[in-house]
Amino acid sequence: MKPMSLLKKRLNNTEAKKINIVEIFKTVEGEGRWVGLPISFIRLEGCNLRCSWCDTTYSYDGKTYKEMSIDDVIKEVNKFGLKRVCITGGEPFFSPALPELVKGLLKEGYKVFIETNGTLWNNQLEDIINENVYITCSPKPPLYFVHRKLIPYISELKFVIDSKITVKDIVKPEFIDLLKNDIIILQPESNKKDMVEKALEIQDELLKLGIESRIIPQCHKILGLP
């Protein structure tokens, strides 16, 4: 079944209190502006994209997950005793139960991070997102499309620097207001040396346009953490 067909099937599922979980674990944030801080991760099952360099393909293989209640997910996270939790995937917005999960975590007092490719949106989140929700959007090739309703809620834009990305993919009209806010992360693909060099070149090009960006590798891989 195709990714979008799976999504439509999920949206018709009335058991919104249930959610498919790939894994829940404690680690340190390895990517983006919050790198190095202790954090709990909730990896949801399913994704609508198939990126060639994806390092979590098991999150959408259709078998590496278990169905859990929202309450049980929160109980697992509570065991770690941390104040931050990141919802990742796969693609979190692929799960129709995402709003219920975010709402439950906020009720418990967590700072909630959501990592998304930006292509999907759930209208229920409009009444849930507050200052304690931090959304990292990592637009993906080849179109680097981001859903227009998500854009006002983006806290951080993260671009994986691979062999194909160009400055034009970053400096898009819909990103202009975000680019002015110093929230751009350039992440060299798989920490490859040649991609680090390309990230430096793109950073220089962005500076010429008056845009600041930060080059941050996948630090959890350097540290040997999940």
Image (tube, rainbow, N blue to C red):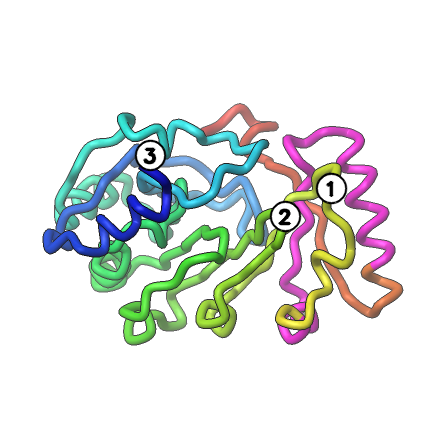
Q: Secondary structure at mark 1?
A: loop
Residue 218 place in picture, x, y as percent: 60, 36
Q: Which mark is residue 193?
A: none
Q: Nearer the viewer's eye, disc 2 or disc 3?
A: 2
Q: Bounds of the magenta span?
A: 176-205
**Is 203 inside the magenta-drawn segment?**
yes
Query: Disc 1 marks which amino acid?
Result: Lys
* 155 displayed left or right of 171: left
**Comes first in the chain, label 1 or label 2:** 2
Residue 222 place in picture, x, y as percent: 61, 28
**Comes first in the chain, label 2 or label 3:** 3
Quadrant placement of the N terminus: top left
Where does label 2 land, which residue? 142
Q: CA distance from mark 1 to mark 2?
A: 9 Å
Q: CA distance from mark 1 to mark 3?
A: 33 Å
Q: Nearer the viewer, residue 101 or 94?
A: 94
x 64%, y 68%: residue? 175
Residue 217 place in picture, x, y as percent: 65, 39
Query: Does residue 77 lie above or below 16 as drawn?
Result: above
Do callouts 2 and 3 mark residues in contact (Cβ within 8 Å)? Answer: no
Do callouts 1 and 2 mark residues in contact (Cβ within 8 Å)? Answer: yes
Where does label 1 land, which residue? 164
Query: Disc 2 marks which amino acid?
Result: Pro
Residue 182 place in picture, x, y as percent: 68, 66
Q: Secondary structure at mark 3?
A: strand
Q: Nearer the viewer's eye, disc 1 or disc 3?
A: 1
Query: Does residue 208 lie above or below 87 as drawn?
Result: below
x 35%, y 70%: residue? 129
Query: Disc 3 marks which amino acid?
Result: Phe
* 224 displayed left or right of 194: left
Q: Which mark is residue 25?
A: 3
